[in-house]
Amino acid sequence: MIVDRSAGVCVVRDCADVVLLLCAHYLRMGLSRLVIIDDGSSDGTFERLEALSAATAGRVEVRRNVSICDQQPELFTEAVNALIAEGLRFILPFDGDEFWNLDRAAIARLTASGTPGVMTGRWVNFVQGRTRAFPTPTSLFAPSWRVAERDADRETVTGLRRAFVEVCESKVALWSDAPVGICRGQHGLTAGPAAALGPDCEIFHLPLRHKSELTKRALNYEPRRALIREAAIQSWQSSFHRDMVLDGKTDLLWAANSADSRGRLDVYGRRVQLVRDRRLQRLLMRAAMHLVARYRLSPV
């Protein structure tokens, strides 16, 4: 069942390994439209999205942006406001590693709300296995551990006292009948409604899908973000990854942010036990089955 007047918006770059599963999850959730903006990918992400758009008869709308710098807030804001102008009610912005844990009934309730407002989602951070160095056809179905403590911050992560995957942040979804402004990272609104649409929900988050993601963050994402950085705290994660990778500490960084065979992080010499959680696995398997059964597309 599709929930009318609901939509998702995402800006992606070089996410060919996950982008079809990502979209399939939100299509299966019941969002009536997806607007996916490819931000200059070179790994086949855009081409996979074009195939999905054709298979969904345009329910997935694909746009391409090519720029030397990261324009994420502007791209999100423009796309969200265009949907608002068309009369869509509930709009869910999401990143390429975020799976909001909502179902059709919840989407329908939010879309039927009579008052503009904001819904907050909180990350539940899942962790990839230590041996997953690069994308393979089955690697996205491997993560079965999540972090227990989620109170790390820039100071503790860059000081090598906590793992990057222990950082927990919140994101927003909304319905509005007037233009809004989207903060960088979709952590809030710079303009728009303030009332709460309902209780907070979970966002299943897989920030590091493979060891190779560290190099991508350092040498692909960071140069574009550095061009527009106005303060050190802005997009600090990619600058941290750049420094670690260029200092030859990729192995150390991966050990701190991936699960060993016993479900533990090795946070710069300190073992941190993770919590067994297979919910992301089940979500991705359902998304894969939906993609194959409904659209005849392979998820990988």
Image: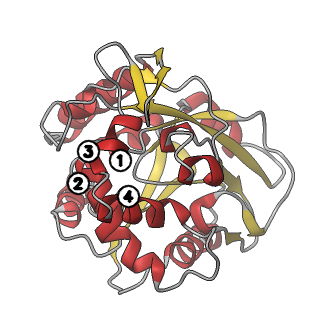
> 215 or 61: nearer the eye?
215
Q: Which residue is mark 2?
A: 52
* Residue at position x 60%, y 73% in the image: 77
CA distance for labels 3 and 4: 13 Å
Q: Is residue 271 left or right of residue 129?
A: right
Three-letter amino acid code of the residue under disc 2: Leu
* Residue at position x 18%, y 70% in the image: 42
For disc 4, the neighbor class at 10 Å (few under 14, some 14 to 19, many from 20) is some
> Is 89 located above or below residue 207 in the figure?
below
Could you tell me if residue 233 is visible in this image? Answer: yes
Identify the element where label 1 is drawn: helix
Q: Which residue is mark 4?
A: 244
Query: Hey, which quadrant is residue 231 in on the image?
Result: bottom right
CA distance for labels 4 and 1: 32 Å
Three-letter amino acid code of the residue under disc 3: Lys
> Is 114 located above or below residue 81 in the figure?
above
Image marks 1 and 3: residues in contact by CB distance under 8 Å:
no
For disc 2, the neighbor class at 10 Å (few under 14, some 14 to 19, many from 20) is many
Could you tell me if residue 58 is visible in this image? Answer: no
* Residue at position x 34%, y 65% in the image: 218
Three-letter amino acid code of the residue under disc 4: Met
CA distance for labels 2 and 4: 36 Å
Find residue 211 and name its label: 3
> 195 or 214: nearer the eye?
214
* Residue at position x 64%, y 73% in the image: 85
Three-letter amino acid code of the residue under disc 1: Cys
Find residue 23 and name its label: 1
CA distance for labels 3 and 2: 27 Å
- Percent position (x, y) of residue 290? 28, 31
